[in-house]
Amino acid sequence: MRYLWAGLGCLSLLCGFVGVVLPLIPTVPFILLAAFFFARSSECLHKWLLTHPTFGPSIVDWQTHGAVAPRAKKMATLACAAVLLLSVVMGLAWHLIAIQAVTLSCVMLFLWTRPNGPR
C-alpha cells in the first residue's frame, strides 16, 4: 500500500510542478495532495516536501492553521481574473463564461475566507 501512496504522491507532485509553468493548472492543491500521500508512504519524501523552501511554508501553514498566505490569495485572484478575461476575449459562449464566473467566485470565496496564518 505504501508504494501506491508514494506513486500517487509523485504523480501529484508532478502535476503541481506542471502547474508552476502552466497558469491554468493549480499548483497548491496538487502539492498539498502530494504532502498527504507522502505522509502515508515515505517519511523522507514528506520531510523533504515540508522543508522545501518554496512549497514547505504553504504546506505547513495549511496543515497547522488551515491558512493561506495573503500573497498566494492575491496571486490566485489574479490568475482567476486572467482566465475569466481570456474567456471573454476569446469570445466563448455566454453560458460558459457564466459557469466559469460562478465557479471561480466560489473558489475565491473559499480562498479569501481562510485565515492568513501566523507568517
Image (spheres, grey):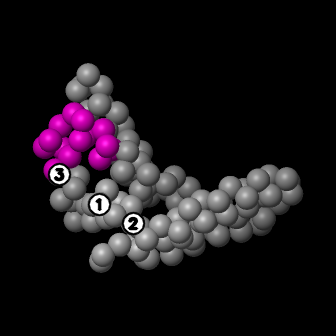
Residue, disc 1: 64
For marks 3 and 2, the one nearer the N-term is 3
Q: Give coordinates of residue 73: x percent, y percent.
A: 49, 71
Check if mark 2's residue and mark 1's residue have beta carbons within 8 Å.
Answer: yes
User: Which residue type does callout 1 highlight?
Assistant: Thr
Q: To which quarter of the image does residue 109 belong?
A: bottom right
Query: Which residues fall within the magenta stretch?
Result: 34-47
Judged from this view, the residue extending furthest toward the top is 1
Q: In this view, does 65 lie to the left or right of 94?
A: left
For the image, the number of numbered tags is 3
User: Which residue type does callout 3 highlight?
Assistant: Trp
Q: Give coordinates of residue 13: x percent, y percent.
A: 34, 45
Q: Which residue is drawn at 34% across and 33% down?
A: 8
Residue, disc 2: 67
Q: Is residue 83 visible?
A: no
Say what secondary structure mark 3 lies in. Answer: helix
Q: How crowded is mark 3: few (under 14 residues within 10 Å), some or many (20 or more)?
A: some
Q: Give coordinates of residue 45: x percent, y percent.
A: 18, 44
Q: How crowded is mark 2: few (under 14 residues within 10 Å), some or many (20 or more)?
A: many
Q: Distance between the residues labelled 1 and 3?
A: 17 Å
Magenta residue check for 96: no
Residue in the foreground of this view, choosing between 52 and 61: 61
Residue in the foreground of this view, choosing between 68 and 51: 68
Q: Is residue 16 visible?
A: yes
3 or 2: mark nearer the eye = 2
Check if mark 3's residue and mark 2's residue have beta carbons within 8 Å.
Answer: no
User: Which residue type does callout 2 highlight?
Assistant: Ala
| For residue 12, above or below residue 54 | above
